Image: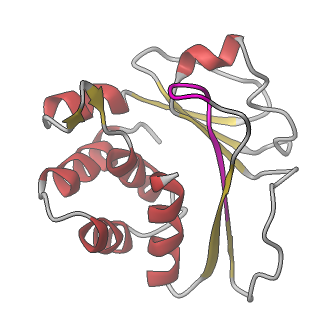
Amino acid sequence: MTAARLLAIAAIHDGKYASACPFYGAERRGAPVVSFVRIDDRPIKVYSQIRRPDLVVVLDATLLGVVDVLSGLKTGGTILINSAHRKEYPGFFTYNIDLTGIALREDLVIAGSPILDTPLLGAIARIGIISQDSAKKAITELFTDERNVKAADAAYREITV
């Protein structure tokens, strides 16, 4: 949910309208969580789940075999997967990046879990959803630790586009 918030803030820095909407179910700690972000050139008047997304981000690649994370993704849509291994989905633009490896390399770990939100923002900037400058601004608004910006920069450089 932090990643969704960061993305919305970055889009606003780019002069767009944006809203982040978390979806809370009967989850327990460690269960899959879903968040939605709307970005537009016009004011956004809908605050709900997105049924036909342009982009799906999968932070845990093990979910790909368990949950239909691509449900509703528009044909020609974009998939960004946190994975060191290449995965392709015909009909979609697929990007793979090892966000976990970047977070571990930058020592972005809390309670034993790698922090993926800030490197994710760098990867999203590289694929053109937001600018790299706005990504950095959003990150520094929420976090003071410069490792977060370093991780975003690393993801920006390392994702293959």
Compared with 9, 48 (above or below) is above
Does 87 sit above or below residue 155? above
Nearest the eye: 28 or 37: 28
Please tell me whether the stretch drawn in magenta is mainly helix, strand or loop: loop
Q: In the rendered view, does 158 fall on the left or right side of 105?
A: right
Residue at screen point 51% across, 29% down: 29
Q: 71 or 36, which lies in front? A: 36
**Foreground residue, 4 or 101?**
4
Q: Considering only vertical position in the picture, is 17 above or below 11?
A: below
Q: Residue at x 81, y 41 (%)?
A: 73
The magenta stretch is: 28-37
The number of callouts visible is: 0
Question: What color scheme is it?
Answer: secondary structure
Q: Position of residue 98 (x, y in %)?
A: 36, 27
Place of residue 87 in the rendered image (x, y in percent of width and height, measured from the top left): 58, 18
Q: Is residue 151 magenta?
A: no
Res 2 → quadrant: bottom left
Q: On the rendered structure, is 28 left or right of 14?
A: right
Question: x and y percent of residue 23 in the render?
Answer: 71, 49
Q: Residue at x 65, y 32 (%)?
A: 27
Residue 120, given in percent of the width and then of the height, sits at 41, 46
> Quadrant of residue 138 in the image?
bottom left
Was residue 31 drawn as part of the magenta stretch in this picture? Answer: yes
Identified at 21% across, 57% down, the residue is: 149
